[in-house]
Image (cartoon, rainbow, N blue to C red):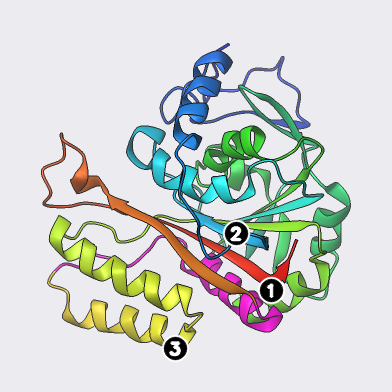
Amino acid sequence: MAFGITKTAAMNPNIRYPAVAETHYPSEAEALEELLSQLLSFDSGDPAHKGKSVRAILAPHAPYEMSGQVAADAYRTVKGKSFQTIFLLGDTHAFFFDGIATDSRHEWLTPLGAIPVNRSLTRKLCSSEHENIRMLDIAHDVDHVLELQLPFLQHSVEKGFSIVPILLGTNANNDQFADLLLNLLQPDSLVVVSTDLSHYPTCHQAMHIDSETIDAIVSLDLEKLDSRQKQLWDQSESASINMFCSPDAIKILLMIAKALGWKAERLSYSNSGHLPYDDKKEVVGYGSIVFYEENAL
C-alpha cells in the first residue's frame, strides 16, 4: 500500500494521510516493519536511564536511510512501554504561520495503521487562555517533522496510545506554552521533540557545533543554548548555518524538564557527512536524547 501527497475526494477528511511515505521511509507495511526491527535491534548496553521513568525523547526527522539509526536509539528507550498520550512537538517546516498549530482530525495514518488523536486535549489547548493556539490542519498536511516519528512509535510503544500533534510557528510564546503543557502532562504521558541539529556547516564543523548543542540540552541549560546560538550567528560566514531546526520545541522541552526535575542523557550522534555519498561540505546533524525521572519504574 503506497501513499502519495495528493489527496482525493474519496479520502476521509477526518484522517491525516502520510505525506512522505515512500520518499522518507518505506510505504509498504512489511518493508517498514522489517526496517524498524533492524534499526531497533541494536543493544545499547547499560545506559544511565535504565530502570528510570522515561518522560521525553528528542529524535531526528530526516529520511530513515540518513537518520533512522539515531532516531531508533531514542525509541529503544521506550520500547515495550505503555503511554496514554504522546505529545509530538516540532517547528513547522512546510507551511509557515503565526502561533501554534494543532490538528482537528480524528486519526493520523501511516503504513502501519491509524493512530488516534487525543481530540479532548487538542480542543483544550485551543480553548486555553493561550491566545495563539488553533486548529490548522493545512500546517500538518505535508509537513514531515511529526510524521517521521509515527512509525517508530507504532513499532516501539505498546498499542493504545493517542497523540497530540503540535507544530510551532513564529511568535509561539514558549514560556506560556510550556506552562500550559506542564498542566496537561500526566505520569503516563510522553513528550517527543522532533528536530535535526546543525544545518549546512562542514562535517567537521557540525561535530563541534552539535557536541556543544547536545551538552547544553543534556544539562538543561537554556542560557547556554541561547548564547551558543547567538555566537554561531555572529561568527558564521554563512547565514544558512543553524544549530537546529526546531528551536522552539527544544526550548519548551527544556523548560518542562527543568520545572519537573527531569534528567537527560545523550544517546547517539551522527551527521549526513558520515554517509558514504555525502560530500561533507554542507551537512545536517542528527542526535538522540532521552529525558527521565530519577525514580525507578
Residue 4 visible in the picture: no
Q: Nearer the viewer, mark 1 or mark 3?
A: 3
Q: CA distance from mark 2 to mark 1?
A: 30 Å
Q: Is 251 one of the magenta-colored residues?
A: yes
Q: Nearer the viewer, residue 9 or 90?
A: 90
Residue 225 visible in the picture: yes
Mark 3 nearby-residue class (10 Å; few <14, some 14–19, many ≥20): few
Residue 19 place in picture, x, y as percent: 53, 31
Report helix, strand or loop for mark 3: helix
Residue type at tag 2 = Lys
In this image, 44 relative to 260: left or right? Answer: left
* Marking on residue 223: 3
Residue 201 place in picture, x, y as percent: 18, 60
Quadrant containing the N terminus is top right
In this image, 58 relative to 243: left or right? Answer: right
The residue to which callout 1 is attached is 177
* Marking on residue 50: 2
Q: Nearer the viewer, mark 2 or mark 1?
A: 2
Range shown magenta? 238-261
Whether 2 is drawn above or below 270: the answer is above
Mark 2 vs 1, N-terminal side? 2
Residue 255 place in picture, x, y as percent: 61, 79
Q: Nearer the viewer, mark 2 or mark 3?
A: 2
Residue type at tag 3 = Glu
Mark 1 vs 3, N-terminal side? 1
